[in-house]
Image (cartoon, helix red, strand yellow):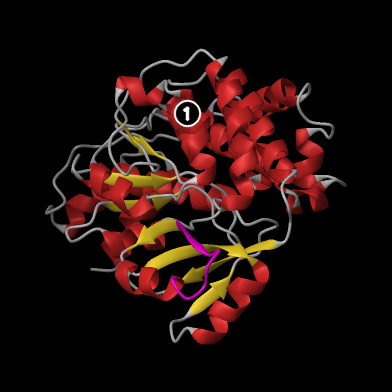
């Protein structure tokens, strides 16, 4: 969750502090305690996990923007669509964090008797298979042959026993995007309706519809509330993003869950896939490597001063020595005369070594 960046990158740290301050009225546990302190075990509860994840995404986005990486188009998966709305200018940061905390609380209050699993098969086959297991629904269309199923835990267990397709149970506390979430829709719609929303400032692909947000859909409170209950159409939204012919696609988050799905969805030639953080790898190494790839492979320049700002780096003048502008093809005797005419010891040793070695 970015702890390494917090200790090494001032810009990331500053934005995360801003998120922590804004969340004080909406969380009963300080954000930094949730991320890395004694309360981090609470991240197993969605009421705490959602604001924590969004805050890290905001801090990562703020850091990238400071270094010169700004989005030409955005999309977000489930909760991530709220963070994408902030990045697109639809939501202010205070509203984003307030609504995220509310969303987490509303979902936390729902029954914990549900479960979710990834199923590896195509859409038509999965739809047919689910008819024999009432109560189960598709929660996310992640890739042509990768879907998430949600519903009652016992029904999902029977489905996993019956299906010939590969499945993977997800470590979640609730059956998100299922009928269990229905009571959370209306209160969240009410909160969204009371929030000042703006049309997107950059193209914004909706994972509720799988198409581009319009000025009307982005400010529609019902759209954001329905996203709690209805499935995530990530594969379709990714196809919309592909229409922009991106040179690079960044996954903003604590671990690259979406990039492998995107790779199997888009056809060649692929853009440069870049991820901000990766579990098991040093945060700064991961992010700086991605920034270098972004610069080298796309030709986009970076804000180099911002990469070093407030890090207490010391600028050192390199040692210099005089050059006697003589051709290197001079005969050995002449080369010896050149070295004798120059007083700098490094310069002398360099030319003496070349002279004696030939």
Image quarter for residue 152? Answer: bottom right
The one of 178 and 3 positioned closer to us in this rendering:
178
Q: Is residue 204 visible?
A: yes
Q: Position of residue 183 (x, y in %)?
A: 64, 40
Compared to residue 206, the image places residue 169 above or below, namely below
Identify the element where label 1 is drawn.
Answer: helix
Image quarter for residue 84? Answer: top left
Compared to residue 255, the image places residue 193 above or below, namely above
Q: Is residue 8 visible?
A: no
State the extent of the magenta-drawn residues as a range.
Answer: 131-139
The one of 57 and 13 positioned closer to us in this rendering:
57
Image quarter for residue 228? Answer: top right
Q: Main secondary structure of the magenta part?
A: loop
Q: Residue at x 33, y 54 (%)?
A: 235
Q: Residue furthest right?
A: 38
Q: Residue at x 67, y 22 (%)?
A: 18
């Amino acid at each position: 969750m970015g702890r390494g960046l917090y200790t090494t990158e001032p810009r990331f740290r500053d934005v995360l502090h801003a998120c922590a301050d804004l969340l004080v009225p909406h969380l009963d546990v300080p954000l930094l305690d949730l991320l890395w302190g004694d309360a981090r075990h609470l991240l197993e509860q969605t009421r705490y996990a959602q604001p924590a994840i969004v805050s890290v995404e905001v801090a990562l986005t703020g850091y990238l923007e400071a270094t010169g990486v700004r989005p030409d188009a955005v999309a977000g998966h489930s909760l991530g669509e709220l963070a994408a709305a902030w990045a697109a200018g639809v939501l202010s940061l205070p509203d984003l964090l307030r609504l995220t905390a509310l969303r987490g609380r509303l979902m936390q209050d729902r029954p914990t008797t549900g479960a979710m699993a990834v199923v590896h098969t195509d859409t038509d086959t999965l739809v047919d298979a689910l008819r024999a297991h009432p109560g189960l629904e598709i929660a996310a269309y992640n890739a042509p042959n990768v879907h998430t199923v949600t519903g009652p835990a016992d029904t999902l267990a029977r489905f996993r026993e019956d299906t010939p397709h590969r499945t993977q149970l997800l470590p979640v506390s609730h059956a998100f995007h299922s009928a269990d979430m229905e009571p959370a829709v209306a209160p969240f719609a009410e909160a969204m309706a009371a929030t000042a929303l703006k049309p997107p400032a950059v193209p914004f692909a909706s994972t509720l519809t799988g198409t581009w947000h319009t000025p009307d859909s982005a400010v529609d409170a019902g759209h954001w509330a329905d996203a709690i209950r209805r499935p995530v159409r990530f594969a379709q939204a990714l196809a919309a993003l592909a229409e922009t012919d991106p040179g690079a696609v960044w996954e903003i988050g604590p671990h690259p869950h979406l990039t492998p799905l995107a790779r199997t969805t888009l056809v060649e030639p692929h853009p440069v896939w870049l991820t901000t953080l990766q579990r098991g790898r040093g945060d700064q190494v991961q992010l700086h490597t991605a920034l270098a790839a972004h610069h080298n492979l796309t030709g986009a320049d970076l804000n180099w001063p911002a990469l070093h700002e407030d890090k207490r780096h010391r600028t050192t003048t390199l040692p210099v020595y005089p050059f006697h502008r003589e051709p290197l093809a001079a005969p050995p005797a002449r080369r010896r005369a050149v070295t004798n005419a120059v007083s700098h010891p490094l310069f002398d040793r360099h030319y003496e070594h070349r002279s004696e070695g030939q």
